[in-house]
Image (tube, helix red, strand yellow):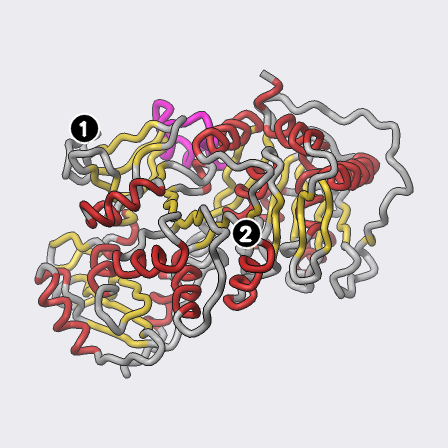
Amino acid sequence: MQSTTFQSLILKGMNRFGDLPAVTLLPDEKTMTYKELLVKTRLISCYLRWLGVGRGSHIATLIPNSLEGVMFGLAIQQCGATLVPLSDKLGTREVDFILKESKPKVVIIATHTHIDTVLDYLEGSIDHDVRIIGLPGFGVHFPNRFELFQWPVESMDLVFPTASADDIALLSYTGGTTGTPKGVIHSQEGLGAAMLSAAIEDPLDDRDRVLLSTPLVHSGGSLLWRALISGVHIYIMPSFQTKHFMHAIKEHKITTTFMVPTMLYRLLDLAKTVNYDVSSMRNIYYGASPISQERLKEAFELFGPIMRQQYGMTECNIVISRLSKSAHVWAYHNKPEVLKSCGKPCLLTEVRLIGDKGNEVGPLELGEIIVKSPAMMVGYYQRPELTKGAIRDGWFYTGDIGMRDESGYLYIMDRKKDMIISGGMNVYSSEVERTVNQHPAVALSACIGVPHKDWGEAVCVIVTTKEGFSCTEEEIIQFCKQNTSKYMVPKIVYIQDTLPLTPIGKINKTELKKMYALGMLTIK
């Protein structure tokens, strides 16, 4: 049905809520109502149509968190085109590859970052009609060959294409830390199904105020779109800054936000030194990894029992399973080990665990997590063999090793690629990290496998300590000996001031392995 396309859902959302506030940019507090957002979006759509954009056109964006980022993303959907969102935190190699593979007809840029890469793409596209549009107001000096965006005086009398269910709404790239990035294709129908599923499972309405500080080209953008179809007032920060984030919660009576655990830990540490009013909060969505019982207790004391964990990935439109607010509370008081889980499958999602021979494994047995959902990707862009390997008989093979308990809660044990084989034993890096993170001095940890002449791979842990705490390499090793299996005890420990993070705040293990190989890690 046409009504379930992402394009139709997002346009209905903007049409329904009129003079209600839609989006506010912090810290200047510039606000647009839904009516204003709809008008501005249509003007941009007219501009894009004038450039020749329509169904099937690829449009790449390099726009920081901003009102413009929201408007252009929505306008691209109104044109029926395909959005190719790029983060300015990507490396030059990744941006160059994505542009050359996706071949966008238009690139919209509002950042100093990657101007040279975009210019190289323009100069190399002599055989194609490529337009590079620079957005004013961001303090960027664009090359003469870029065009400067100008608002149309009025909306032109144009017919906007109606997207069909099979049209590509989103081409989102993932996996750029190793090899080349993979373009994940999401159809209009699939993205629409993801929005509807989220709206049913986690209701938001026009009384909610959502605060987003993570890059909108990642998970934050999904929550933004999902909020816009429900009349929510959305507050956007250019980036995450702990004090400003807490101040925004208090000043704007924020009810809902999304963050990765590293962000939550920083908020909890700040709250120990400064008192903030966070009584308005009723939902904290977090993802990337489960939270420790100690940190969850701190979160309950500060925010109340409002935590919601999400497990997902780009290929599955972010969400595969959820650990609900009530499940967090029940587990905390009755069965703390469930806090290590990522909950149970979402409404429209089926989940199975498969052994090495393709057999379905039973409770408490390890297997690869495979997923079936109307919201999952169509495939990888121009990678038929990769798609064939990832999607089999309608099931997406995630590459995650998991386990179910007797109650049906799903546990992520590790990524296949992060599993360490040491002395013939399978060591799950996430399990090592869970043990290390229980040490009272440890703030964050990352476990990687490093080459070893006797063991094949040795378990190596890199940690950062909490403010005001310290520990030694030997203390971490002894702590692990007392709390985990012998073969999982790290043989090497590095204590660092910081850990490298990906653009969405996950610990970058690829970078840590590179740092180890170059001798850049130190033992304190």
Q: Residue at x 21, y 72 (%)?
A: 492
Element under disc 2: loop
Q: Is residue 188 above or below residue 122?
A: above
Residue 74's quadrant in the figure?
A: top right
- Name the amino acid, label 1: Asn
- Asked where in the image residue 510 lies, by quadrant, the reply is bottom left
Q: Tell me the crowding category of disc 1: few under 14, some 14 to 19, or many 20 or more residues within 10 angstroms, Cα based.
A: few
Q: Position of residue 468 (x, y in %)?
A: 33, 80
**Range of magenta residues:** 372-395
Q: Quadrant of the N terminus?
A: top right
Give the x, y percent position of residue 199: 50, 32
Q: Say whether residue 210 is left or right of residue 313.
A: right
47 displayed left or right of 340: right
Is label 1 in a helix, a strand or a loop? loop
Residue position for label 1: 359
Q: Position of residue 426 (x, y in %)?
A: 16, 52
Kindly identify which numbered label has been placed on residue 80.
none
Residue at image mark 2: 254
* Spot occupied by residue 178 in the image (x, y as percentages of width and height): 42, 55
